[in-house]
Each structure stands twice: as C-alpha cells, then as structure tokens.
Amino acid sequence: MQISRLQNAFRQALVGLAVCAWCGLLADCAPVVGYPKDPEDTDATLVTLAPYFNGSKEADYVNTDPTNVVLRKQKRDVIILERIHAYNIEFADFERRLYGDGNEVSLGSDLVGLVLGGLIATTGNAATKSALGAASIGVSGANTAINKDLYYQKTIPALLAQMEADRLKALAPIAAGLKLSDADYPLMQAYIDLDAYKTAGSIPGAINAVNQSAGNAKDDAQAVITLQRASAVDQLKGIQTVQAQLKSLTTDAQYLALARAMQVYLSSRSPALQQVINQLDPKALRLSASAKKARQIMNIWIENDDVSTSNQQQWLTAIAVASTAK
Amino acid sequence: MTDVTVKRPYPKATNSKADVQKVQQQILENKGNTGAKSCVLSEDDTNWYLTTVYETTC
C-alpha cells in the first residue's frame, strides 16, 4: 500500500515535470510579435552613425567655409538625416519591444493553458489527470497574473499611435528646414527640432498628449450655457414666488410627481434651459427613479426659468397637483 | 461626474449691481437644494454676469 502510494506520487511528479518542460518549449515556440523580422543589422548601423552624435561630423560642418553654402548645406542635411535615421531605428526597436513583449507572454500562456485543458479531458489515468490539472491551474493562474497587465496591453496601442502622431508632427519643422539654406536653418537650430523629434517618441510625451486631449474634451463637456436675463428683479420675484409654494412639498413622492407634472412644459422652455436640464439629468432619473435628482432639477429649473406669468402659473398648478401625491 | 456651468448676463442698462447681487444671494442660499458649487458675479462694459456651476448628482 505504502509502495503503491509512493509509486503514484513518483508517477505524478514525473508527469508534472514533463508537462512543465513541455510548456516551456511551447511557450518558447509561441511568440507572435506582430512585426516582420528586420533585415537590417541595426546594431551595426548605429555604430556607423556614432560620428553624427559624438561631435566629429559636427566639427567638420563647423569648420566648413561659410561662404561655401552648397557644401555647408550638404553637410548639415546629412547630419540631420542620419540623426533622424538613428532615432527611427531606436524608436522602431522601442516600439517592437513595447508591443511585442506583452503579446508574447499572453499568447504563450494562453496556448499552453488550452493544450493542457485538452489533455486533461482526453487522458484516462486519474494520476495523470491530477498532475495535468494542477499544471493547467498553474498556467491559468500565471496567465491571470499576466492579465493584470491587460490594461497595459490595451493602453500601449493607443500610446504608440499617439507617439507616431507626435513624431510626424515634430518631423514637419525639420522637413521644412531642410529646404532652407544653411544660413536660414543652421545645424544648431536643427538640433532643437531634432530633440523635439526624439522626445516625441516617448511614453511620457504620449501620455501628456493624451491627457491634454482628454482635458480638452472635458472642457467641451463643461461649455458654458448662456441664459438671457432681462431683469434681475423680475427673476428674483419669480424664484421667490415659486419657491415659497415649493416648501409645501416635503416627500420624495411629491417631488417625483412634480417632476412628472412639469415634464410636459419642458419643450416650451428655451433650448439653453433644456440643455442645462438634459446635461444634469441625461437619463431623466427625476421622472421615476431618483427623488434626489427630482428635487435638484426642479430647484435648478425654477432658479433659471423665465419669469413670465404663464410659466409661474404652470409651476403653481404643478405644485398643487404634486402636493396630493403620497 | 460632469459639472454644468450656467452663465446669465444681465444688461447694465436695466439692472443695478445690487439687484444682481440679490439674485446671487438667493442662488447661494438655495445651493443645498440645487447642488450649486459656486455663483460668481462678473462684468464687462455692457453686462453683469452670474456664473453658476451646478454639480451633477447620482
């Protein structure tokens, strides 16, 4: 009995080890990074581009006779273009790693999890099922942990798109400068634009741009609604007359009833006032679900309503009807 | 939650500053019922303005 239990445990351990080793192999084979292999040996290219960053090409440019405008422009252009080339190589590598790494991990563990699940269903031996099941749970658990980074994975494409857009924007003044003479667009000025181009390909830069867009959208949502007012005195009288009657309403049911009674008049009010109410209560909760919302919207409506006699009469009648609600 | 800003112009030709301030006072006194976060009086050459920010509630 004891020996049989030991044999079972040994068998389970062997199966577990085999599965783990096989999982490792499968995960190694699984990567899908979303980018074709680059035929260029970019490391070697970057080495050849070093003189454009270490000052030697710049010294050559500076020492060129200023009266030889053609040669000077030629040297300037080469420095600018080679620097752009280097930035592009680094950005492509950065982009590849950002996008590729997340997919690699997730796809690998997903596939292993699926295959293990299939094996558990088709393997007859209880001990093997047990070992495979444990391994499957382990892999699924790992993937769950990885999926905590789902937000990261979903955010990266948006940030990459922003970075691409920012880089194109930053490239525009450089492209325009290349068409100018060396006197009008000297290398030192180009360096400033090149720095902006380099920074445009960063995550902090992209996050800033995205936040700026979100801020602009929020500002749009908070656009000022203008309500024309002829007389402050008349408005005050209107508010006070209706508010005095409103005090007779005390229950939630009465406020909901008032909101429903006034709803038929909303379309007769100014578009600006309708906009205020719709923005404050876009789902019209005041009409059924939320007495709190009904209380707020009715008070705001009164505060901003036109003070014509007919409008006041609508309020007084509606309040009288609502006061009977239970 | 998105706040809603309402701006009300009162022509200076027909309204004194004191009258507009009374409306402002009324709005501020009623903010417990309306959810008004602020009500600011401002002006330009032709108008007084009351700018009220209402807070949306659930």
Image (cartoon, rainbow, N blue to C red):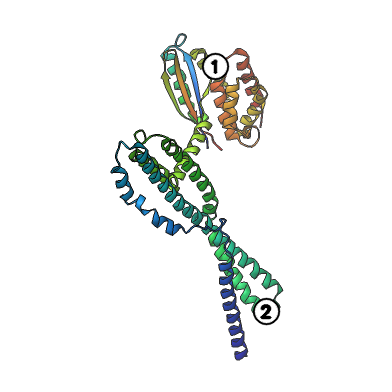
Q: Residue at position x 57%, y 61% from top?
A: A106
Tell me if residue B54 comes above or below residue A122 in the rendering.
Answer: above
Q: Residue at position x 45%, y 19% from top?
A: B49
Find residue B12 and report its horizontal and vertical position in percent. Answer: 44, 11
Q: Quadrant of the N terminus of chain A?
A: bottom right
For label 1, the residue is: A238
Tell me if residue A270 comes above or below residue B3 in the rendering.
Answer: above
Q: Residue at position x 60%, y 31% from top?
A: A294
Find residue B34 and report its horizontal and vertical position in percent. Answer: 52, 29
Tag 1, which chain? A
Find residue A199 and report its horizontal and vertical position in percent. Answer: 41, 45
Find residue A4 and report its horizontal and vertical position in percent. Answer: 62, 89
Q: Secondary structure at mark 1?
A: helix
Please name the amino acid that badge 2 sits on.
Answer: Ala
Q: Secondary structure at mark 2?
A: helix
Please name the amino acid that badge 1 sits on.
Answer: Gly
Tell me if residue A27 comes above or below residue A73 in the rendering.
Answer: below
Q: Which dot marks residue A126?
A: 2
